[in-house]
Amino acid sequence: MKTMRLFQAAILAMFILSANAAFGQKEKTVEVGGSPMYPSKNIVENAVNSKDHTTLVAAVQAAGLVETLQTAGPFTVFAPDNAAFAKLPAGTVETLVKPENKATLTGILTYHVVSGKLGSKEIADAIKKGNGKATFKTVQGGTLTAWMQGKDLYISDENGNKSKVTIADVFQSNGVIHSVDTVVLPKS
């Protein structure tokens, strides 16, 4: 009897999903860089459409991380916008995207990525549990510290540099993106 109810519930869920698709029900999106970010698309498929993240996309391509960020993940990406990259000293981005600097660029980019799907609620819960701060291990191997200032969420790198989350909870099929206003750097 229990198995039959589960089967009926599964059939009903499939019917609702197919009906939504058939009647053109739209996904709930977040606009980033003038474009909607679709929860059904992966991180790369969405990021390439953001006019605010063209530098990040170029850097991800130069580092050879496109395929990685298209996998199932899940990943939490603290995505620097173009203005964040512009804060770096003149010529830094141009130098980093050169083939001979691929390892350094990869290290910087993967320092902005945490394994798992951490929305702002999960990050806030970790901050509360940590008495005002939470640390997260990055894919690069370093640590990011998250904290709140009023209602604003910030991350800090191991060098003490801080970055404000300007757009939170841009959910993707393989994780979540939080747009940030400053590039954070691993310990040198």
Image (tube, grey):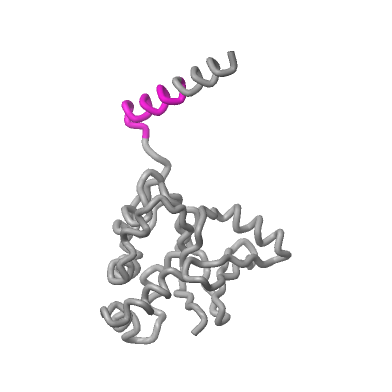
Give the quarter of the image for residue 150. Answer: bottom right
Residue 19 included in the magenta stretch of the image: yes
Residue 176 included in the magenta stretch of the image: no
Q: How many numbered marks are there?
A: 0
Q: Residue furthest top?
A: 1
**Is residue 183 shown left or right of residue 22?**
right
Q: Residue furthest left?
A: 99
**Which residue is at 62% across, 61% downward?**
151
In the rendered view, tell whether residue 151 sits above or below residue 108: above
**Is residue 64 shown left or right of residue 11?**
left
**Which residue is at 28% across, 71% downward?**
62
In the rendered view, tell whether residue 107 sits above or below residue 177: below
- Highlighted range, magenta: 12-25
Q: Residue furthest right?
A: 131
Residue 70, horizontal then vertical, whole percent:
35, 54
**Which residue is at 41% across, 46% downward?**
39
**Is residue 146 shown left or right of residue 33?**
right
Most frequent secondary structure within the magenta stretch: helix
- The quarter of the image holding the N terminus is top right
Front residue of 66 and 90: 66
Residue 8, horizontal then vertical, whole percent:
49, 17
Front residue of 167 and 10: 10
**Which residue is at 50% across, 62% downward?**
114
